[in-house]
Amino acid sequence: MIIILLLSCFFIILLYYILYHGRFRRLVSKIPCKPGLPFIGNTLEFCVYSQEKLWNLARSASKNYYPIFSFWCGPIAFISVHHPDDIEKILSSTTQNLGKGYLYSFLNPWLGTGLLTSEGSKWRKRRKILTPAFHFTILKQFVDVFVEEGNRMTKFLKDSNSSNINDLANFISQHTLNAICETAMGTFLQNMDEFQQRYHQAIHEMGNILTYRIMRPWYHPDVIFALTPMGRKHAKNLKILHKFTEKIIAERRQYHENTSGRYLKFLQDTDMIETDDEEIIGIKKKRLAMLDLLIAAARNNEINDSDIREEVDTFMFEGHDTVAMGLTYAILVLAEHKDVQERVRSEVRTVMHENKGKLTITALNNLQYLERCLKESLRLYPSVPLISRVLSEDIKMQSYLVPSGAVIQIHIYDIHRDPNFWPNPDVFDPDRFLPERIQNRHPYSYLPFSAGPRNCIGQRFAMLELKAIIASLIYNFYLEPVDYLKDLRFMMDIVSRVTHPIRVRFVPIE
């Protein structure tokens, strides 16, 4: 009897598998497919190709199979979607298709299931807790930090023996790391130089390690990956990254313990009152930050200590690395376009004069031409070139029915250069973002911060930081290229990166 029952269960499971995967494969097979091998599909391309070659392969496939194509990595079906109408169906859903899926699972040992990688009710709860951290009144307080960081960069460049920066992304990211710590974390890094340097190195190594792992499907189980040299390097960097964030959390907790938690009560005030800068028991009191929201939520038993670290790890990474690359490409674009650079400089000077030499949030909002330049730079060189979703229901695209369970790839880089929506797409033209030209443009043809319910929670934060730092640099320096945009060689990574350091010259304005 037991044997018959077990065989019946086995038969039912087998039947379900055959019916589900039969239908799944039948629907996917109707979508134009990039040629691959039987059973393993395109797995070998992931394994043997370099990150640079994979980048170029993705670009050519996006053109040759526009607007949709499929490819297989073993049993996993990936659907690459490029038309804004289809993308809107995927990203705009408020209840379905919010899962990140396969590619993001590799981030879990580092980021856990924080806001970037979590799904369902956990994601909704975290989003609700963290949204007030990016309210306008909070961002208004952070502008001073962005300006201060721009001033530190200016001082370093003026005190330097050379006007050349030989690794622009590395130089910029050190300062954006300072900015995210002093704003969202409420922590000063001036006394953490050693930790900062090690963290900075580890976070850049992690991108390469994770891409390496994604390209080798047999390393997917943690136990297998841990036995490899790359796995041991991954574990070493995880310790550095987690130790850094734990130190930041401990320092902020100590601050609230030393002040009896009285400043956390301001989190209940919609005005989010800014505290003064007096010294309290050796710790400088700062504005209430995102980390304070997490600490307050933990005190109310809404989240625990590991939840706090998940979000701090997530925002430390997302809040500094993506902004750093956005600044890097914007600086290089402005360095090459002298006429645009001079117009930005004129606008910055005018706004600075009107505000008595200071950059405030009002002043930054008045830098409309600079904002258009930054938006156009993010169009050409989005900091995050690819996002992914897993369908939790069938979706009817323009021409095909894509089944539940498929992994959707949205190549933002290619969408931003689609000639059907962006005439002369490879040309830098800030006037694309004039109000009258934005009106009739498809809202899902421009996705530098993603879109829909899972859009970037910190996009206003990022834009203010971009504007504040660029304004400071443009006001004090002429930007001149050493490396040129046409020579950039991109590689497949979580964040948009090139194969070689980018060099730029900063010539002080006398």
Image: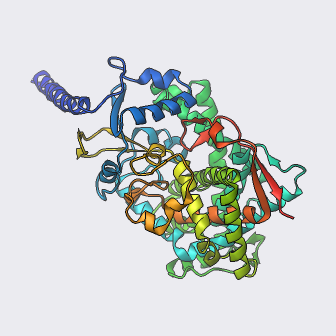
Instruction: Say how many tags the image has.
Output: 0
Residue at x 29%, y 57% (from the top left corner): 95
Q: Position of residue 267 (x, y in %)?
A: 53, 76
- Can you tell which quarter of the image residue 154 is in? bottom right
Front-lying residue, 117 or 265: 117
* Left or right for 59, reference 153: left
Residue situated in front as seen by the camera: 153 or 221: 153
Q: Residue at x 57, y 31 (%)?
A: 52
Which quadrant of the structure image shows residue 80?
Answer: top left
Q: Where is 195 relative to 69, above or below? A: below
Question: Which residue is at a point 49% across and 27% down the rendered structure image?
Answer: 219
Left/right of residue 10 with respect to residue 322 in the rendered view: left
Residue 43 percent across, percent down from the top left? 42, 23
Residue 482, x across and y down, in percent: 75, 43
Q: Say if residue 365 shows up in the picture.
A: yes
Is 318 in front, or is 65?
65
Using the image, determine if residue 39 lies above or below residue 472: above
- In the rendered image, which quarter contains the C terminus? bottom right
* Residue farthest toward the top in the current orientation of the protein: 38
Query: Where on the picture, by quarter, is residue 349?
Result: bottom right
Q: Is residue 183 left or right of residue 418?
A: right
Residue 79 in the image: above or below residue 314: above
Residue at (14%, 23%) from the top-left corner? 7
Q: Nearer the viewer, residue 402 or 229?
A: 402
The answer to whether residue 507 is left or right of residue 108 is right
- Residue 131 x %, y %: 47, 67
Any part of residue 355 in sight: no
